[in-house]
Image (tube, rainbow, N blue to C red):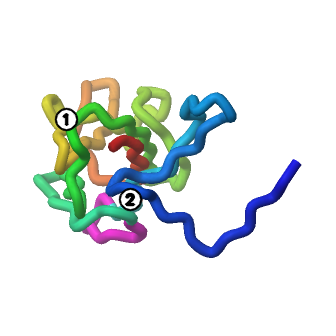
Amino acid sequence: MSTLQVGTIKSASSAAPVFQNSSGTEIGSLINKAVKFSGFSGTLLFDKGISSITDNGTGDYTVNFDNAFSNADYAYTFGAMNESGTTSTSTDDDRNEGGNLRVKNEGVAASTFRVQSWRTTNNGETANDVPEICIFFIGS
């Protein structure tokens, strides 16, 4: 086995570098964009390839990309920290804790991504700001 040690990897095109096996089949790629932000203030806590967060109201945010993807077919994953300091994703397991996330209807676009956080209680769902939201994006 060989170890490659370099200071910089540069793509030959404007696309992100990809990893291929010896047959030339893609077996991985780098995270294109990532963000961690406060759901309370919309403040960026960490970002890669993100220009800003738009706070559309309680529990409703739009992530604005520095550079658009070529289309809206990119992959994403997300999670949130709820008020109790634990993390959750888009499930109803944390009843009365908040921190549930979902993609806003028609919220995936080449240049933006809209996400909502909410609290599930015995009375239904309520939009809810959360301490932190993290989202990773992979695409071209």
Q: Above or below — where is 97 with respect to 33?
A: above
Position of the C terminus by quadrant: top left
Residue position marked by numbered label 2 in the rendering: 35
**Which region is colored magenta?**
39-47
For disc 1, the marked residue is: 104
Q: Decide which of tag 2 and tag 1 comes sooner along the chain.
A: 2
Q: Nearer the viewer, residue 18 or 91?
A: 18
Left or right of 24 in this view: 94:
left
Q: Is residue 36 magenta?
A: no
Q: Secondary structure at mark 1?
A: strand
Label 1 Cα crowd, 10 Å radius (few <14 / some 14-19 / many 20+) = some
Which residue does the image show at 42% across and 52% down from the upper left?
16
Residue name at image x 58 percent, y 33 percent: 24
Q: Is residue 15 above or below residue 106?
A: below
Q: Residue furthest right?
A: 1
Residue at horizontal 73 percent and vertical 67 percent from the top: 5
Q: Amino acid at mark 2?
A: Val
> In the shown orientation, is residue 113 left or right of residue 90?
left
With respect to residue 41, does 127 lie above or below? above
